[in-house]
Image (spheres, helix red, strand yellow):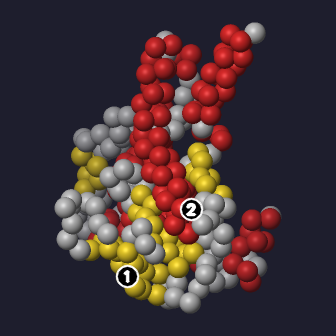
Amino acid sequence: MFYNDLINTDFFAGRMGRGYISDVKQDGTTYPVYYQYWIEQLFERIMRLFVWENTGVIKPKEIEQRLLLAGKCAIAKMPKEQELTAFFCSFFGVTKYVDEFTNVNIRCPIYAGQRTIGVDCEIIDNTSLRNPALPLINHYATLLAHTEVSLVNCLVNARDSGGVPVVGTENQKQSLQNYFKKKYNGQYGSVTDAGNLGIEMLGVRRGTEQDVKSILETRSGLLKSFYSDIGVRAAFEKNNNAVVDEVTSDTSLLLLNLSDMIDSRKKACERINKLFGVDFDVHIAKEINYNTENEVKKDVVRDENDN
């Protein structure tokens, strides 16, 4: 099979070999694994919101990574270099306002220094309040990880309807663990306890109160809520289930969230272009650009009225 052959190649030996697959099979349904999966997935998805152009040697992902992780990104030049670089940064100094500064510390893996904003450095903000997206990503990754664990538990627990087992000896414990491992892997198993048949099943319902369908709906709802919080309408949302006024109101709220981020980036581009004589530009990915769609509709209406 293609996947197994690829995993066995030397190319993946350092990071993804047979040992990696064994670990995933053993621990792949635990909360830490699901959390790691979702925090990486959500971070990657939010990275695709904006498209940067004409940034020279700076890769757009370097700008977005710093904005999403720290809420701000400094653009400046390294000593004795003409090319611009994206830096992590922190502000310092005393100013009239607690969130506005003129001085900034900049850093990257090979350099750290100080710059003056508007003189030899400009700052890109993620939002008007410089809030990073990481707390939001962490929040939804936590909820989605718990949802995934609940889904697996629901599926596995549905294979039997017993209560909670209570054991009194180590042999009983080992026997039950072997039984549950077989059940988890879809195999038949039995509880063997020749020394002391004293395993008790308490009358507690181990199955979840939620069924599989409701857990899947919760998962979809969380993803929809995540996209709404960053200003994107989820692909699985059906507008025909809502009246026109509800759809219009919902879209306006989405645009409010998204417009703050794009406005912060566009204003920063203007300042960077003016200071360094470059041509930075940024726009919302066309797949989610409601503003563009609305402008197109306005232009069509205008043309019709002119005719």
Where in the figure is residue 297, as x and y percent of width and height?
65, 22
| Residue density around tag 1, few if under 14, some if 14–19, many if 20 or more, within 10 Å | some
Q: Residue at x 21, y 59 (%)?
A: 97
Identify whether 305 is placed above or below 184: above
| Residue beneath the point at 46% across and 75% down | 120
> In front: mark 2 or mark 1?
2
Res 176 label: none
- Where residue 256 sits, quadrant-wise, is top left
Of callouts 2 and 1, which one flags the residue occurring earlier in the amino acid sequence?
1
Q: Which residue is mark 2?
A: 273
Label 2, label 1: how many angstroms apart (C-alpha)?
21 Å
In the picture, which quadrant includes the C terminus? top right
Q: Foreground: 93 or 250? A: 93
In front of the other: 134 or 213: 134
Q: Is residue 300 above or below residue 223?
A: above
Asked if residue 304 lies left or right of residue 272, the reply is right
Q: Residue at x 71, y 12 (%)?
A: 306
Q: Which residue is mark 1?
A: 114
Q: Identify the secondary structure beneath mark 1.
A: strand
Could you say which is closer to the camera, residue 88 or residue 148?
Answer: 88
Q: Is residue 59 visible?
A: no
Amino acid residing under circle 1: Gln
- For badge 2, the amino acid type reads Asn
Q: Is residue 284 visible?
A: yes
